[in-house]
Each structure stands twice: as structure tokens, then as C-alpha cells.
Amino acid sequence: MVENLAKMAGALAFAGMCVACSSSVKNEPKQADLKLEPGFSATIIADSLGAARHLTVSQHGDVYVKLNGLKDGKGIYCLSDTDGDGVIDKTTAFGNYTGTGILMDENYLYASSNTTVYRYKLDEHQQVIDADHPEVVVDGLVARAIDGAKPLVIDKERNLYVAVASYSDACADETKDGKSCPLLDSVAGIWQFKADKLGQGYSDGERYATGLKGVMGFAWNDVSNSLYALQHGRGNFHEKFPLYFDASYSATYPAETLYELSKGADAGWPYIYYDHVQHKKLQAPEFGGDGKKEGDNKYLEPALAFPAHLGPNAMLFYTGDMFPEKYKNGAFVAFHNQSPELHKGFCVAFVPFKDGKPSGDWEIFADGFAGIDLENPSGPSQHKPCGLAQGPDGTLYVSDDLQGTIYKIAYSPQS
């Protein structure tokens, strides 16, 4: 028996799996109490993972989840259905660092801490070969107390994009001359690196886009061959500028904005913000604005704007064949917060696209994660959508970083 156990441990080590953190437990999926359109259904494939942030799914159906807090000393969990019956029966954990970003291509799994991008070599089954020795792709990225997450995107040319958020809401304290923000050299933008080059830092990359206060959700659009990014809007107008703004303004008007980016794009933070009610770029009060002065037209126009404070934490362009045709090449967005204006949030939204451009109003696709009535709340939200991933069969996976729940949404035409 001892000999058999030794052989088993050796096989797992050879496959790059952490023997101490690998378990084979049959977790029967249960129906999720979500509000979905007819024909859609949702199940919970995992629970209690902790702060489950972004996730990615291999072509073999393994679900890799990045955690923003270590669970049993590990920051990446792999959920596997080894016998193909639709039930997660094996869990493997590795990585001793926290963070948000994770993605997979044919040969590597990429994952990020708040300062570093790592990669793991994959075998022919897209399983990690050496979990204990990841390679460092990018290091030395700025991370402060808040908004330190480093989400990741790779395009078809093997360029790696890393979003670096600002740790300042408006750059007011950092600006000395009242005209320029010194933070833009290292935060509030998206940096482009090479996915296949190791040991990179800021000097090896290129600032692809700037003026983006905080990007958590962004994705490459294969139809337009361009990068789309969702910006978290700012707040706190009324606290420092009560002459021009009240609390209602701060809660309603600074939109969450979607941009189509090209190299050199400037979305304008901290000098402007976008008012989704007036459909205007307005000058930030720290730089002379009063809620009426329009911002400089040199800054990028949003492709779409959402109400304030919804917290778009992930974005995915749907390329599968399972869902109805209306969803093909459209964008799903995970909202991690709620809009005080709408009393809606903690949901997954959908934006229709045509020819690589937004083609209609956004709508709520999956709701009910909060578990409470947001207009008359009886307590805090129970779940907060954070990450999105598409399975090889066209299913949609959603992570929740409050309870560590992983949802799987499928579609079956009604008879």
C-alpha cells in the first residue's frame, strides 16, 4: 500500500500538481437562485473558495480561479471534472500569492499578483506542469493600498496587456501645479508587454492607453481587432467641492465608461469625467470644473456609459455557439457593486455588438446574486459577481468574491 501511495504521489508531482493541496471530492452541483431569461439555467459548481476574482477555463473544461486571499496557503484553484459527468470531482491548488488576473492560452497559464505577472507551462491537457516554479513575465508594477489588481489580456499577436489602476481617486493631493497629474507615468492606464518575454518591467513595455482611473474588466475584440476597457468612475465630488455638488450628484453622475482603445488613447482621467445623463465629458472640479464646464474634446469619447458606481469588474466577448444568436460576439459585464440611482447591481449585464461596435442598450442578463431587494435591503449583498469566463461548450462561468461561489450558466432551447 505504501508503495502504491508513493507511485501516486510521484505521478501527481510529475503532472505539476500540489499533492498536499489536491483533493478528489464529488461536489454535486446545485441550482442557483438567479433570475435568467427563459431557456437559461444556472448551477453552483463550487462554493466557499474565498475571494474568487477572475477565472479562466481550459479547452478540456478545467476551471482555474484566482483568489485575492490565500485559501489553505494557496492563491489559484483548479476545479476539474475528470469523468465528464458535469460534476467537479477534483480540486487542485497552487501559487502562494494573492491577486486578480488570470488567463490561459494554448501553452501557458498566466496569473498576476498586484505587482507581478507570472506564467506556468501547460502540458497537452492544459494542466500546469510545474506549479511550484512559475516564470516571471513582468515585475515591479505599482501597487498601493487600494485598487492594486492587475487584470490581464493577450491579443492574437501575443501582446500582453496589463491594467494598472490609480491609487488616487482624483490626483488632487499629488498634483502640485494644478494642471498635471504626475501619477500617469506608472498608473491609471494599460501597459503593453510581450507575452513570451520574461523579466520585463515598465521600461520594457509601452503605455498603450492612459487616462483610465481604474480598469478591472477589459477584453480583446476579435471582430474589430481592438481592445475594449471598462473604467471605474470616480466619486467624492461633494466632500471637497460642496459649493458645486451634493451627495446625490456624486452618487448619480460620474459614469462607468466603456472605451474602444487604440495605441496612444487618452480617456482623460483625472482631468475630466463623463456625465451619462447629459452625455458629456465634463471638467473635473480639481482642474476648474463646476459640473457644467465641458472637458477638452481631445480626450476619448466613450463607446458606452453605465450609471455610476456599478463597479464593472470583468468583461467577456461571447464567441460560443450555445447561447442564442443575439449574444454572439456581444459583451458580458460583471457588475460588482450597485447603482444608487437605479437600485440595481450585483449582476451580469449584456451589451449587444455588431461589427465590433456596441449596437444597442445594455440589459441585465443574470440577476439575483445579491439575494436581497436592493430597493429595500434587509442586509448586505450575499454575493458579488467579479469574474467571467467562457467554457469550451459555450457555457458562461461567473465568480463571486464575497462567498467564493462559482456559477455555471447554460442554455437549452425550450420545447
Image: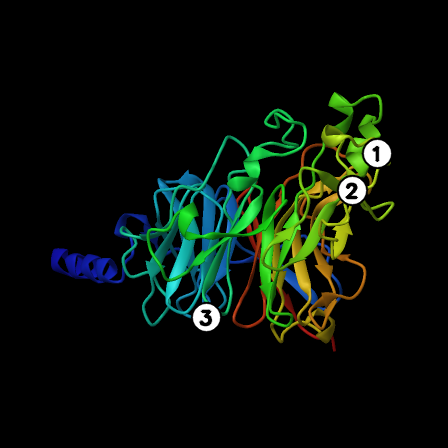
Identified by mark 1, the residue type is Gly
In which quarter of the view is residue 287 placed?
top right
Q: Earlier in the sequence, mark 2 or mark 3?
A: 3
Q: Where's residue 316, x and y in %?
A: 61, 60
Q: Where's residue 48, x and y in %?
A: 50, 44
Residue behind mark 1: 291
Q: Secondary structure under badge 1?
A: loop
In which quarter of the view is residue 62 placed?
bottom left
Cα–Cα span, label 2 and label 3 = 45 Å
From the viewer's perspective, is the residue at label 2 or at label 3 nearer? Answer: 2
Q: Where's residue 114, x and y in %?
A: 45, 41
Residue behind mark 2: 295
Q: Nearer the viewer, residue 110 or 292?
A: 292
In this picture, residue 315 sits left or right of residue 249? left
Q: Earlier in the sequence, mark 3 or mark 1?
A: 3
Q: Residues within 10 Å of mark 3 (few under 14, many from 20)?
A: some
From where the camera sits, is residue 360 visible?
A: yes
Identified by mark 3, the residue type is Gln
Is 371 placed above or below 134 here?
Answer: above
Given contact means CB atoms under 8 Å apart, are the residues at marks 2 and 3 in contact? no
Q: Quadrant of the C terminus?
A: bottom right
In this picture, residue 311 sits left or right of residue 4? right
Q: Residue at x 37, y 44 (%)?
A: 74
Cα–Cα span, label 3 and label 1 = 49 Å
Cα–Cα span, label 1 and label 2 = 10 Å
Residue 59 is marked as: 3
From the viewer's perspective, is the residue at label 3 or at label 1 nearer? Answer: 1
Q: Nearer the viewer, residue 415 or 128?
A: 128
Identified by mark 2, the residue type is Gly
